[in-house]
Amino acid sequence: MTTLLHIDASARGERSLSRKLSAGFIQSWIAAEVSAEVIVRDVGTHPPPFVTEDWIRAVFTPVEQLSTEQSARIRLSDTLIDEIERADVIVIGSPMYNYGMPAALKSWFDQVIRIGKTFTFDLARGDFPLEPIMSGKTLVILSSRGEFGFGIGGVRETMNHLETHIQTCAHYLGVEQTHVITIDYQEFADARHEASIAEAFEAIEQLVMDLTSCDA
């Protein structure tokens, strides 16, 4: 049985294209694997709090020395990390905001990338002292962008700080395989946009077929 962690980051509701993509992906997966478990985490409507000095102090305090207040302060972080540990596939539906990820999604990453929880730090490793603790996870990024040309070789490749940032962070959550499906041209609202929507949903069907057949 596969466990999927379904994360939505859009501040929009029904109008959100990234939400439609992630919902379509989950629906397709359930149709292919009825026994799959889905953990839902909507950071777009319920954003995790920003990291503070008190939060940092708590996560660097040994567990046996944590005060009641400190334990409460990092309880959400512990819960979010537990959701990642349980997941085989992490599905992130996110719009591109100002060429990067929404603040709510960045806050989620800040809550879950924790020393001793999701990565270890050892200077004996030289210039690359960080290593993820978890492994073997698959990441699916489903994004919507107002413009176009953000892929490799595209006219806006260097402006894409959404998928690149997500993939950099996701490495420390044990992600070893990443798939990206996008909708472009949203601000143009023309035939290219409509074609991009259709292509994205077709790509979802194919990706789900490929991933579920690999698990079979």
Image (tube, rainbow, N blue to C red):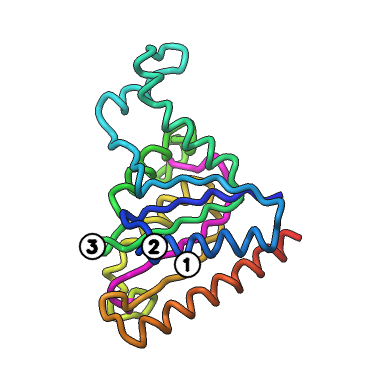
Q: Find disc 1 in the rendering and name its residue.
A: 180
Asked whether residue 16 is drawn in magenta, I would say: no
Residue appearing at x 41%, y 11% in the figure: 65
Gap between marks 2 and 1, in whole Å?
8 Å
Callout 3 environment at 10 Å: few (<14), some (14 to 19), or many (20+)?
few
Residue appearing at x 76%, y 60% in the figure: 216
Q: Position of residue 202 (x, y in %)?
A: 55, 77
Q: Tell me which amino acid carries mark 1.
A: Val
Q: Position of residue 91 (x, y in %)?
A: 51, 55
The region drawn magenta spans 130-149
Query: Which is more N-terminal, label 3 or label 1?
Result: 3
Q: Residue furthest right?
A: 216
Question: Dot 3: what SS?
Answer: loop
Q: Find disc 2 in the rendering and name its residue.
A: 163
Q: Find disc 3 in the rendering and name its residue.
A: 98
Residue appearing at x 62%, y 66% in the figure: 208
Query: Which is more N-terminal, label 1 or label 2?
Result: 2
Asked whether residue 137 is drawn in magenta, I would say: yes
Q: Position of residue 127 (x, y in %)?
A: 39, 45
Relative to 204, is 94 above or below? above
Q: Nearer the viewer, residue 80 or 161?
A: 80
Question: Dot 1: what SS?
Answer: strand
